[in-house]
Image: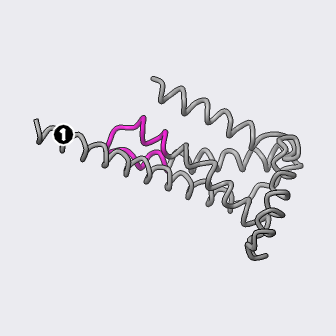
Amino acid sequence: MSRWVALGGYAVFVLWVTLMPRLEDVGADSLAWRLLAVVHGWGVPAWFDYAMLEFMANVAMFVPIGMFGVAILPRHRWWLAIVTAFFFSCAIELAQLWWLPDRVADWRDVLANSLGAALGAGLALGLRALRWKSVNREDAHV
């Protein structure tokens, strides 16, 4: 039950960030520009620009969704976490397109979000495999 609550809470957070009427209302835009100035000061090349940072942020935002999805789904249905995240992202982008004129709906956000969910699902599956291996190793020594 707590996994469902965690997923629901995180989904509400994602909706809050993505469906604010203006991105500036979240404060992420100014934070992004400050972060870019810092990393460029460290010598990160100029090709790592705002668009690249935004893409990576979209990937990172959906990693927990993939992880929580795998955690709540039956073992053989893990892939549904990625499919569900894809449709969740599509719904967000359509809502931005239809109802939020100050936001930009972009297919690259769907790609980034889906990639993030896939990475999160892969991470959760890897952690699950390590846990299974550890439990079986302990059982063998008993």
Question: Quadrant of residue 48 in the image?
Answer: bottom right
Q: Is residue 75 magenta?
A: yes
The residue beneath circle 1 is 138
Q: Residue at x 34, y 38 (%)?
A: 74
The question of residue 99 being in magenta is answered with no
Quadrant of the image containing the C terminus? top left
Question: What's the amino acid at mark 1?
Answer: Glu
Left or right, residue 130 beside residue 3: left
Quarter of the image with the N terminus in it: top left
Q: Is 13 drawn above or below residue 50 in the view shown?
A: above
Q: Where does the image place residue 51, in percent across and percent down from the top left? A: 76, 65
Towards the viewer: 122 or 113: 122
State the image coordinates of residue 88 (x, y, percent, origin top left): 61, 44
**Residue at the farthest front position:** 42
- On the picture, is 77 further left or further right than 62? left
Above or below, 38 against 46 in this view is above
Q: Secondary structure at mark 1?
A: helix
- Residue at image x 82%, y 51%? 31
| Other-residue count near label 1 (Cα within 10 Å), few / some / many at <14 / 14–19 / ≥20 | few
Taking the image as shown, residue 22 lies to the left or right of residue 76, namely right
Dominant secondary structure (helix, strand or loop) of the stretch shown in magenta: helix
- Residue at image position (34%, 45%) is 128
The answer to whether residue 21 is above or below residue 53 is above
In the image, the segment drawn in magenta is: 67-82
Q: Position of residue 108 (x, y in %)?
A: 68, 62
Q: Position of residue 68 (x, y in %)?
A: 49, 39
Name the residue at 85% across, 58% down. Answer: 33
